[in-house]
Image (cartoon, rainbow, N blue to C red):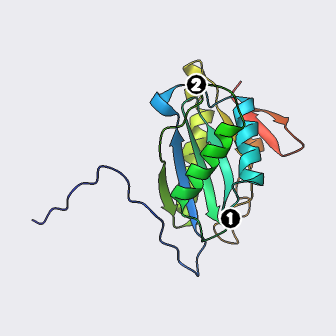
Amino acid sequence: MNTLPRRRTPAKGVHVEPDQPTILWVTVCSKDRVEWLAQERVMRLLHSVWLKEATAWLVGDYLLMPDHAHFFCGLRDSGFTVERWVAFWKHRFARRHCEEAWIWQKGSFHHRVRSVQEYREKWTYMTETVRKGVSESMGRLALARTCSRVAMVGELKRTRSTASLPLETQNVNGRDALPRVR
């Protein structure tokens, strides 16, 4: 039996196929898993950086947990690798706050989403985390939001509605609702 060596870290880069959208599901963590991410100030800063400064990849739906974040992003400018883009927005985010404890773990984990079904599975994982009260049961907050519209294919423009989640919502900065665990 031929066995392949096991990777210690995820492979770098993303294979871009010109005839298909390049959508990633990304996870980033706080350094030493310190719990500072799931708060509105962080959400607003990230949202602003992603919309105004770090636009080589467009962030779609995202979930901020206390010590890590999950989000979908789509390629907009092929001149930037996802690794370079993540490093860029982390740096921009760090320049816009004055909190010593708000430090990112180096790098990120990303997975190429290849189908609508896979997108739905990742979205379900994110929403079930909030819906099941995983963070609430641990006495922690989770924030979910949509930044930009990132679609796999025509049929996946908006296949789900955040309104169906058992969450409190509010309007932030004139944008769509911000679901929050109560």
Q: Position of residue 133 (x, y in %)?
A: 60, 28
Graded by Cα atoms within 10 Å as few (under 14), some (14 to 19) or many (20 or more), the crowding at tag 2 reads few
Q: Is residue 74 in sight in this rendering?
A: yes
Three-letter residue code for mark 2:
Ala
At x 59% / y 81%, what residue is drawn? 19
Above or below residue 17? Residue 137 is above
Amino acid at circle 1: Ala
- In the image shown, does 151 or 59 lie closer to the viewer? 59
Question: Which mark, residue 46?
Answer: none
Q: Quadrant of the C terminus?
A: top right
Question: From this viewpoint, which residue is outermost toward the top?
Answer: 139
Closest to the observer, 117 or 78: 78
Label annotation for residue 101? 2
Q: For the residue labelled by badge 1, is the local secondary structure a helix, a strand or a loop?
A: loop
* Residue at the limit of the structure toward the left, as seen here: 1
Q: Residue at x 38, y 59 (%)?
A: 11
Tag 1 and tag 2, C-beta contact below 8 Å: no
Task: Tell me if 129 is positioned left or right of 13 in this view.
Answer: right
Residue 112 position, x and y percent, is 50, 62
Residue 166 visible in the picture: no
**Quarter where residue 156 is shown:** bottom right
Number of on-image labels = 2
Q: Is residue 3 above or below residue 129?
A: below
Mark sitting earlier along the chain (1/2): 2
**Residue drawn 55% across the image and 62% down it:** 117
Residue marked by disc 1: 151
Q: CA distance from mark 1 to mark 2?
A: 34 Å
* 133 to the left or right of 49: left
Along the line of sight, the residue nearer the viewer: 157 or 20: 20
Q: Position of residue 127 (x, y in %)?
A: 62, 42
Regarding mark 2 in the picture, which secondary structure is present there?
Answer: loop
